[in-house]
Image (spheres, grey):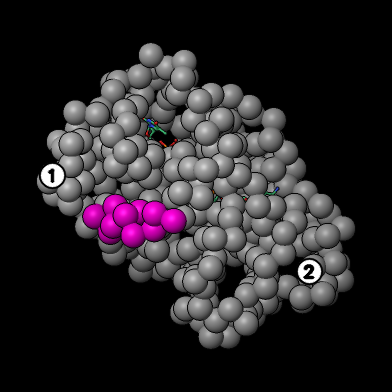
Amino acid sequence: MKNMLITGGAGFIGSNFVRYMLKNNSEVCILNLDALTYAGSLKNLEDVPGAERHNFVQGDICDRSRLDSLMRQHEIDTIVHFAAESHVDRSILGPKQFIQTNIVGTFTLLEAAKSYWLQDRKLDGNQARFHHISTDEVYGSLAPNEPAFAETTPYQPNSPYAASKASSDHLVRAYHHTYGLPTTLTNCSNNYGPYQFPEKLIPLMILNALEGKPLPIYGDGHQIRDWLYVEDHCEAIELVLRQGQVGEEYNIGGDNQPTNLEIIQTLCSILDARFPDSPHTPHSKLIKYVTDRPGHDRRYAIDMRKIHNALGWQPRQALASGLEKTVDWYLANSKWVVEIHKQQQYNQWMQQNYADRP
Ligand code: NAD
Ligand code: DAU
């Protein structure tokens, strides 16, 4: 793990992972390849430590010749693949880009890795690694008493986003099985924490509440997610890179199952405590029930026994204190927020997704 290609390293989890790796590993050199779509920004990387070991390149994972030359030029031995279209609601309104980036992009990256590692360099599982970052959404939705998602749970993706990620997972598996590409794969639950783009539930609710805007809850708000603090996810990925078995998958989660309504009420209480004199306190009065997400998955839960038993990993951050830290990060980083709120593209998305949602 010397020369690491990180795709999507200017996005939410990717930028946290770049920061985490540079801080905790003095030997690793990172080549960060990101197309800088609406979701990626160099502002997410401004404070990375060890900047001399971080090389940013703007580029597309679908560009095969670019991948070929970058892998050779930087003698890449490890790939950590985050780059994706990641927002479920966008996949419902416009699935095409999800097929291109998540499926064609992953295929292109796998081909580049196969060509450079297996054909040119004749590397094996101890000398190279392709780690694919995936999601628990590939397993579909759980009924109230159904057991949590295990690595053996059949795939049943429900949204175009989940289907595109499931497809990419199958490609990764096939490249290991057929060609012997040294792969590992992790399926993780909902992340939250610093630098999350404010189209996702937690940052959107924090920022809307601060401005006294409605807090749009899809449907009845009783959908359940498992929430993981992003730094815990980074730690789990590093552990799988170092100690995970080639060809294996590991589920990762935060070991909690709050409803969306509970998450939003907790965020409102945190803001009430921070701003007792705000005209918007109590912030929960801003909650507004709106038209549900089509095909909305009801419940996710993660069975983490495999990663815990095999690698000793478990989440460190409790949800209540993690949410407090996250609120405080958004309060302390209003400049970062203002830049996004100024973007025409962002405001267009807000209009498109929420305007016709009574
Ligand atoms: P994000 O949307 O914040 O970031 C995605 C990044 O990928 C952006 O920087 C974007 O510019 C880049 N990108 C998009 N298309 C690209 C392309 N064609 N070439 C190069 N770069 C491209 O996403 P995120 O929330 O950080 O998620 C990262 C990964 O983790 C995704 O694969 C996602 O499916 C997975 N995941 C996310 C969560 C979550 O809760 N956010 C949970 C589990 C898994
Ligand atoms: O489970 C892992 C997945 O978590 C990742 O693979 C995805 O990349 C990531 O976006 C996330 O998907 P979700 O759809 O669960 O996250 P989101 O933040 O969009 O929504 C969380 C829940 O909140 C979901 O039940 C929908 C609901 N919601 C969301 C928004 C944006 C609302 O009720 N209102 C909203 O405005």
At horizontal 59% and vertical 52% (from top left) the residue drawn is: 40
The spot of residue 51 in percent (x, y) is: 58, 78
In-image side of 10 versus 213 (left or right): right
* Left-right relation of 33 to 246: right
**Residue depicted at x 32% and y 38%:** 211
User: Which residue lies under the disc numbered 2?
Assistant: 71
Above/below status of 129 relative to 289: below
Magenta span includes 287: no
Q: What residue sits 36% from the left and 24% below the top?
A: 218
Determine whether the beta carbon of the residue marked 1 sits less than 8 angstroms from the nearest atom of ligand 2. no
| Residue 306 in picture, x, y percent from top left | 40, 57
The quadrant of the picture occupied by the C terminus is: top left
Identify the secondary structure beneath mark 2.
helix
- Where are the magenta residues, as a range? 324-335
Which amino acid is tagged 1? Asp
In front: label 1 or label 2: 1
Q: Is residue 97 above or below residue 271?
A: above
Rendered location of residue 205, percent (x, y): 33, 38
- Mark-to-mark CA distance, 1 and 2: 55 Å
- Labelled disc at residue 277: 1
277, 130: nearer the viewer: 277
